[in-house]
Image (cartoon, rainbow, N blue to C red):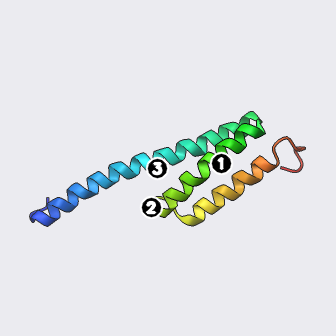
C-alpha cells in the first residue's frame, strides 16, 4: 500500500484512467464487431457504412495510445479488402 500522498494520488489517477480506457477499448471492439457482422451478412452497403463509422474510432484509439498504430493499419487494410471483394466470386476473396 502506498504511504505518501503523491503515491496515493497516482493510484487514484491510474484507477480512473483504467476505467476510461476500458470503456474506450470496448467501444472500438463494438465498432469492429459491427463491421465484421456486416461483412458476414454479405451486405456491401452496410459494411461500407460500418467501416466508415469505425475508421475514426480506430484512429482516435491509436492517437490516445490504446492500440498500436500498426494494428490500426492492419485492421483497416484487411477489412477494406474484405469489403472490396464482397459480392465477388469466392476465388477473389
Q: CA distance from mark 1 to mark 3?
A: 18 Å
Dot 2: what SS? loop
Left or right of 30: which side holds 65? left
**Between marks 3 and 2 in the image, the one whose residue lies nearer the viewer:** 2
Q: Which residue in the structure is indicated by mark 2?
A: 64
> Sequence-wise, which precedes: disc 2 or disc 1?
1
Residue drawn at the location 85% of the way across and 41% of the way down: 87
> Sequence-wise, which precedes: disc 1 or disc 3?
3
Residue drawn at the location 70% of the way across and 51% of the way down: 79
Label 1 crowd bin: few (<14), some (14–19), many (20+), radius 10 Å: few
Where residue 2 appears, as percent x and y from the top left, is 13, 61
Q: Quadrant of residue 56?
A: bottom right
**Between marks 2 and 1 in the image, the one whose residue lies nearer the viewer:** 1
Where residue 14 appears, as percent x and y from the top left, is 27, 57
Up the image or down, 49 lies above or below 11; here it is above
**Between marks 1 and 3 in the image, the one whose residue lies nearer the viewer:** 1
Q: Which residue in the structure is indicated by mark 1?
A: 52
Left or right of 8: which side holds 62? right
Where residue 77 appears, as percent x and y from the top left, is 70, 58
Q: Which residue in the structure is indicated by mark 3?
A: 25
Where residue 50 appears, as percent x and y from the top left, is 65, 42
Say which of 2 and 76 sits in front: 76
Residue drawn at the location 41% of the way across and 46% of the way down: 23
Q: CA distance from mark 3 to mark 2?
A: 11 Å
Amino acid at each position: 500500500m502506498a504511504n505518501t500522498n503523491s503515491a496515493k494520488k497516482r493510484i487514484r489517477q491510474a484507477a480512473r484512467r483504467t476505467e476510461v480506457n476500458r470503456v474506450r477499448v470496448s467501444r472500438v471492439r463494438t465498432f469492429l464487431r459491427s463491421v465484421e457482422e456486416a461483412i458476414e451478412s454479405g451486405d456491401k452497403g452496410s459494411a461500407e457504412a460500418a467501416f466508415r463509422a469505425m475508421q475514426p474510432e480506430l484512429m482516435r484509439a491509436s492517437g490516445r495510445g490504446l492500440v498500436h498504430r500498426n494494428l490500426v493499419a492492419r485492421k483497416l487494410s484487411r477489412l477494406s479488402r474484405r469489403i472490396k471483394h464482397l459480392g465477388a466470386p469466392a476465388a477473389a476473396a
